[in-house]
Image: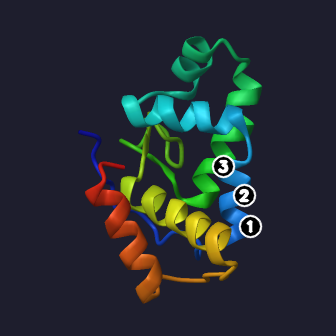
Amino acid sequence: MPRVIQSDPPPPMSVEIAARVFGSSLRLALLRHYRGTASSQADAAVALDLTQSVVSKNTAVLVDAGVVVADPPGRWKGTPGKYIVDEERLRHLMAVTMIYSLNGNQIKGFDKDLRQAAEALSKEGW
């Protein structure tokens, strides 16, 4: 079971962030990769047969969205060693996407509907 790592507060939830994260098959592949095992960007590039540059740019988007976090920190200050998925953040972003897709409501934070949707995703094994 992947671990949840607490770090700096993630950016607020929004449909725009969800679209950026989920709107690319490459980013979805990176999410699957980082969710399966803590991995460096170099390892992800090899596993997914991508260039280091492509992995770096798209990992940065996932980190900025708060769904991928460094674990553990790298040898040099500010340089992550490996990346993993923040499971709770991912479920909440999926919930934002579901709620907006189904009824058009924009969610900007952790409100009651978002918590309930994220809990439902968690109970269903997401």
- The image shows residue 106 at horizontal and vertical percentages of 67, 81
Q: Mark 1 falls on what kind of element? A: helix
Asked if the residue at tag 2 contacts the one at tag 1, i.e. Cβ–Cβ closer than 8 Å, the answer is: yes
Which residue is the extreme one toward the front? Answer: 102
Asked if the residue at tag 2 contacts the one at tag 3, i.e. Cβ–Cβ closer than 8 Å, the answer is: yes
First along the sequence among labels 3 and 1: 1
The quarter holding residue 11 reads bottom right
Residue under pointer 1: 16
Does 5 sit above or below residue 114? Answer: above
Residue under pointer 2: 19
Does 40 sit above or below residue 28? Answer: above
- The image shows residue 67 at horizontal and vertical percentages of 51, 54
- The image shows residue 50 at horizontal and vertical percentages of 70, 17
Residue positioned 68% across, 29% down in the render: 55
Residue positioned 64% across, 77% down in the render: 103
- Classed neighbour count for the residue bearing mark 1: other residues with Cα under 10 Å, few (<14), some (14–19), many (≥20): few
- Residue placed most toward the observer, 94 or 32: 94
- Residue placed most toward the observer, 100 or 60: 100
Residue positioned 69% across, 32% down in the render: 26
Q: Mark 2 falls on what kind of element? A: helix
Does 43 sit above or below residue 76? Answer: above
- The image shows residue 37 at horizontal and vertical percentages of 37, 29
Q: Mark 3 falls on what kind of element? A: helix
- Residue 22 is marked as 3
